[in-house]
Amino acid sequence: MSYADFRLDGLEESVPEPVQRIAWFVFEWIPLAILVGVWELMSGTVVPSVVLPSPFEVGAAVWELLVTGDVLPHLQISLYRVGVGLALSIVVGVLLGVGMARSQPVENVFEVFLALIYPIPKAALVPLAILWLGVGTETAILIVFLACLLPIVLNSYNAAQDVDQNLIWSAQMMGMPSWKIPLKVVIPATFPSILTGIRQAIPIAFIALVSAELIASNEGVGFEILRYGEVGAYTLMFAVLVIISAAAFFAVRGYEWAERRLIRWT
């Protein structure tokens, strides 16, 4: 749920829909407008404009990068890495979370592993990943996978523990084999919580991606941010930051749109 949705929850029944939409727009975009305004005031005053270009200069640079297509190959590579890493974390996270909730031996094996690895900043694992996989796509995918894993595991685990036992007993009475119950009963019952875990993992995936590409890549948006920063092209550096932020924003919004329809169908 977005900040605007949260603020408008109490208005749904008492305010006409057109007014709700205007209020949603205000709550959604006014904070961004304030941020841009503060950025504009600080550029050239508190912070030298060479180091902090104005938002208008950055906006022009974003347009230039998109029109010329210079950033598009790097953006495509980064989105591929996010997609693969997130997809792997969804598959492994759901199976692991449900398995831990339904099997004590599985929980005993993996609980300690997750508790030990999660507090470690994932960027700290990049040098180790480089030793294993080298510099490039595989390392970035691994870091995204590890960063996204726990939110999905926790949501799946907590939801699977709360599944109505009557559903499981009913499936057993109908002759369903025990190994099919997690797939046929538990996972469908935990579907809304699984979707929530994925929603939480999407922004984490982009954070982990940029961290990995800053250290262990020669392509992608993180590499472009580092490259422009090293040569002092700060306007282009901020432009790439804006582009990847916009990509993450639309990824979350697109997922929320799809999630509402999936929950409605299920």
Image (cartoon, rainbow, N blue to C red):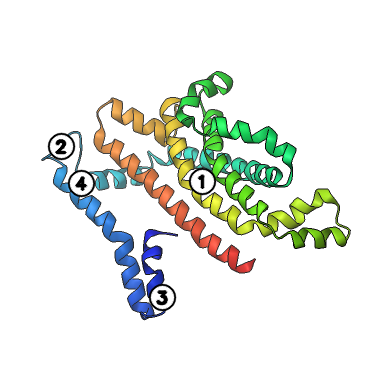
Mark 2 vs mark 4, CA separation in Å: 10 Å
Eyeballing the image, is 244 above or below 166? above
Q: Position of residue 30 (x, y in %)?
A: 27, 60
Identify the residue under disc 1: 201
Question: Amino acid under label 4?
Answer: Trp
Which residue, given by chain and number where applicable, does mark 4 sit on?
39
- First along the sequence among labels 2 and 1: 2
Q: Residues within 10 Å of mark 1 (few under 14, many from 20)?
A: many
The first of marks 3 and 1 along the sequence is 3
Q: Which residue is mark 2?
A: 47
Q: Between residue 199 and residue 74, name the one nearer to us.
A: 199
Q: Residue at x 25, y 34 (%)?
A: 234
Assign a secondary structure to mark 2: loop
Please name the residue that numbered disc 3 is placed on.
12
On the image, the x and y values in percent for residue 20 come to 36, 74
Closer to the eye: label 4 or 3: 3
Using residue 5 as the reference point, say whether residue 158 is left or right of it.
Answer: right
Residue at disc 3, secondary structure: loop
Task: For label 2, count other residues whose C-alpha is less than 10 Å away and answer few (under 14), some (14-19) or many (20+).
Answer: few
**Which of pointers 4 and 3 lies earlier in the amino acid sequence?**
3
- Name which quarter of the figure residue 17 lies in: bottom left
Amino acid carrying mark 3 in the image: Glu
Cα–Cα span, label 3 and label 1: 29 Å
Task: Compare residues 225 and 16 and report the one nearer the observer.
Answer: 16
Residue depth check, mark 2 versus mark 1: number of the one nearer the observer: 1
Q: Number of callouts in the render?
A: 4
